[in-house]
Image (spheres, grey):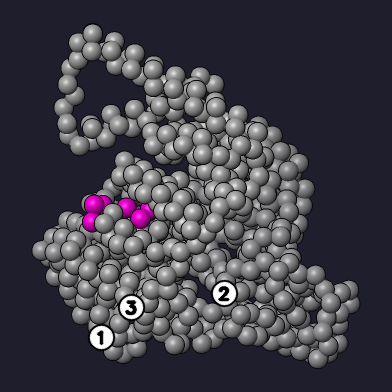
Amino acid sequence: MDVFDGTYGMYNSKQNTNTPLKKFVVPSIKVCFWRIRKQWKMHGRLKVKTTAEQQEAKRKEREEKLSKYQAATGRLFEKRKNAEHDGEALDLTGRILAHNSDFLTMWNYRKEIFQAFHKDKSSDEMQQLYQDELSFLETCLKSNPKSYSVWEHRCWVMDCMPQPNWQRELLLCGKFLEYDERNFHCWDYRRFVVRRANIPPQEELKFSTDKISSNFSNYSSWHYRSKLLPLVHPDMEQPQGVEETALLQEHELAQNAFFTDPNDQSAWFYHRWLLGRAERDQSIRCLHVCRPLNRLVATFSKHLKASAATLNVVKDGEVITGRWHTPRGTDTFEQVLIFEFPEHSLTPDRDQHIHVTLDTEAGLVGRECVLGAGHPEVFSRDITESQELFRSELSVAKSSVLQQELESCQQLHELEPDNKWAILSVVLLMRAIDPITYQEQTLQYVDKLTSLDSYRRNYYSDLSSRFLIENTVMQSEEGTNKLDLSGKGLTCVRHLDHMTLVVQLDLSNNRLTTLDIPVYMLQCLKLLLADNNNIESIAGLTNMPLLGRVSLRNNRIAKAQALAPLASCTNVSVLDLEGNPVCSTEGFKSDIVSVLQQIKVLDGSKI
């Protein structure tokens, strides 16, 4: 590769070896000059026209610098190859890095040099060398304050230093954050220093408050605050949660920020974090035991990996040895797992008590059910959630404050009717307070967001779909295994983990374009209706052994091969495709049968 366009470098993650592990392209002198020119342009400075003589002089100057650069890097690569860790190498790498601080190979070489020095030099000598290195790093940061390599090397130096001065590093962070308070590299380094120096989180919370007070438009400080609050004001009942009183005070702080500058995103994102749903503990949400298939389906509140989880199945007081796997047979993280009972385990002549347990960090969780004699299947599900399925539980006090917060955001919306952040916050607050009561209003607000922010119209369409699905699931009759989502204008399907016990699902008359989603989670599904959509792909309709009929009338399926995923659903015998482009092709029925040999009835006619 031409050195003028880029220089090959070698990254070695093992600092005490000379074996190159990974090749990557290091920015060259040309790239560095381009960055400098871009920075001048970004700062609004006019480009001064130069004469031909001046251009020629600059060209010669660049060529001379390039020649020196190539000579120095060539010399260093040779020295590193020969394991030469001396003062000359330290000096040469310093010269290179002073002009190109993103040359990671040179930083790795410097680490090797310092490690070699440890063998021959005293602690005081190494302290001085590291002190000089810190000064050199400050010089590099002044010219490139957002260099990943420089900040990472500084972390390494401080960890290796015999007597590190952590307080000075905190002051250094303060100086750089005064220069650019949004420099997330410096914020990351400050968190590193705070951990090493054991700085109390209360002090750092005060620091973030000071930074926010000086400038509300500081996303990094708001983000840092979200990490500190659970440490300073922990919720004893919710891991990683924030104590209620402190949380409500944060609402007031965020409100002051976005009332000051409604168009700044930083405070709105923090406000959205404050409204986030509390994380639920791992649990077994529901069970389905099927005697004909000799298996058990378990749905969990969080993803887990079958090969790494400690799961036990007890039948009539006896631990059963069987195989856990995902619906697709992959060793991946899923919320739905299947347990295959040993042959003849589920005898039909008597009741069978089945208990499933999962060992979690919080302790043992479980769920049980009774498969009655002569019954082919049994369902077991949570009956205590209902309205709290999709939102965190709110106390009376917190709900009243959120109502006040809603009124404030609505007031801001009246003052700033075209501010999308105010409207979106109103929507989220309504969802947090009472999603059913505010359903129509939230959908109206989302429609307004679509017209105001047309570049994100698909996002808002999916948001409406999510809200409608959540409300439909919450309003479903307790114990029902049928779910009607037809005619709601859905553009996507969410929360499939809450539908795993559904037997009949109606998705007809919506705006769906694909079923390339994990529909396989619906392991109890027997009937799927998805007529009158715009579906082109059904890639997610796989490995569903109970599925018997699929209706896809009036969609956009163009080829018989697009139906291939259904081949893994071996019980599907009835398929409706009327109104799809594939039906207009010659001999399409024979094409369908060649792909789906289990089909017995196609578009109402026997095969």
Secondary structure of the residue carrying numbered label 2: strand
The label on residue 301 is: 2
**Residue 323 versus residue 580: which sits nearer the camera?**
323
Range of magenta residues: 178-186
Alpha-carbon distance for marks 1 and 3?
Answer: 28 Å
Q: Earlier in the sequence, mark 1 or mark 2?
A: 2
Q: In the orientation shown, which residue stands out farthest toward the left?
A: 415
Secondary structure of the residue carrying numbered label 1: helix
Q: Earlier in the sequence, mark 3 or mark 2?
A: 3
Any part of residue 12 in sight: yes
Crowd around label 1: few <14 · some 14–19 · many ≥20 (10 Å):
few
* Left or right of 297 on screen, residue 142: left
Amino acid on which the number 3 mark rests in the picture? Gln
**Residue 128 versus residue 354: which sits nearer the camera?**
128
Mark 1 touches mark 2? (CB < 8 Å): no
* 335 part of magenta stretch: no
Alpha-carbon distance for marks 3 and 2?
Answer: 33 Å
Crowd around label 2: few <14 · some 14–19 · many ≥20 (10 Å):
some
Q: Quadrant of the N terminus?
A: top right
Q: Which residue is mark 1?
A: 400
Q: Which one is in front in this view, the residue at disc 3 or the one at disc 2?
A: 3
The label on residue 115 is: none
Amino acid on which the number 1 mark rests in the picture? Ser
> Residue 367: x percent and y percent?
66, 85
Mark 3 touches mark 2? (CB < 8 Å): no
* Left or right of 286 on screen, residue 207: left
**Residue 521 versus residue 216: which sits nearer the camera?**
216
> Residue 344: x percent and y percent?
89, 77
> Residue 80: x percent and y percent?
60, 35
Q: Which residue is mark 3?
A: 202
Please give the name of the residue rendered at 36% of the width and 49% of the height, measured from the top-left corner: 135
* Left or right of 332 on screen, residue 294: right
